[in-house]
Amino acid sequence: HYRTSQKRAGLKEIARRYHSIYVMSVTGILAQVRTMPVRVSGKVEVLRYLLLVSGLLVSSVLVSAYRHERILEAVLVRALGGRRTLIVRAQIVDFGLIGFAAGLLAAPASVLLTKLLVSHWLGGESIVDTVLWFALPAMGILLNGLLGYWQIRDVAAQPPMRLLSSTQTAC
């Protein structure tokens, strides 16, 4: 804490006398070092969100791949007298369970990757975030359920014959 001009002048005099001594202020360096963990943890959070988005994209592709089968299931349920709400609820539960399973897989993977990244590569101490164990399955249910419903919402609204004719022309 050499902030006074008298102490600073004394340091300059020592540096002039002894040429092998180099005096420099480390406050700027320490300030940058203190902000590094915040910046690194921000990057780790960005990676987590990118993984979440990629998981939603994979779910979207899966929903699109099995759209034909879901249409046939909806036609069968509607032909047997099932209501629109039954089809919608079944689809939301179906996609919610897929999201729950994805969240259960994502929680330990996220904790493991964060621990590996922080403790081994960055040399820091990893803190296990127990909120992830509950948040990721809940987010999976919510996001995947909404995504699945949004992609197949028109299936429940159409009459069975129109759905069948649209699947026959699409094949």
Image (tube, helix red, strand yellow):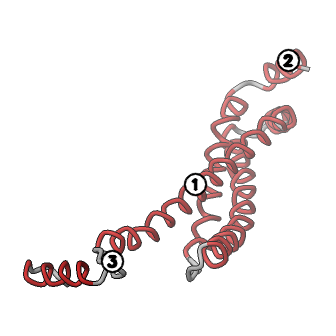
Q: Secondary structure at mark 1?
A: helix
Residue 138 image point, x, y percent: 60, 63
Nearest to the observer: residue 64 or residue 105? 105
Residue at (56%, 83%) from the top-left corner?
Answer: 125
Does residue 157 lie above or below 142 as drawn? above
Quarter of the image where one finds residue 73: top right
Pointer 1 residue: 49
Residue 165 is marked as 2
Gap between marks 1 and 2, in whole Å?
40 Å
Mark 1 and mark 2 residues within 8 Å of each other at the beta carbon: no
Residue 86 image point, x, y percent: 71, 45
Does residue 14 lie above or below 138 as drawn? below
Residue 22 is marked as 3
Does residue 98 lie above or below 152 as drawn? below
Nearest to the observer: residue 146 or residue 105? 105
- Disc 3 residue crowd, few under 14, some 14–19, many 20+, Cα 10 Å: few
Amino acid type, mark 2: Ser
Q: Is residue 127 visible?
A: no
Q: Is residue 1 left or right of residue 116?
A: left
Q: Is residue 65 left or right of residue 2?
A: right
Query: Considering only order in the chain, which callout, 2 or 1, is on the residue closer to the N terminus?
Result: 1
Query: Considering only order in the chain, which callout, 2 or 3, is on the residue closer to the N terminus?
Result: 3
Q: Is residue 1 left or right of residue 44?
A: left
Q: Quadrant of the C terminus?
A: top right
Quarter of the image where one finds residue 66: top right
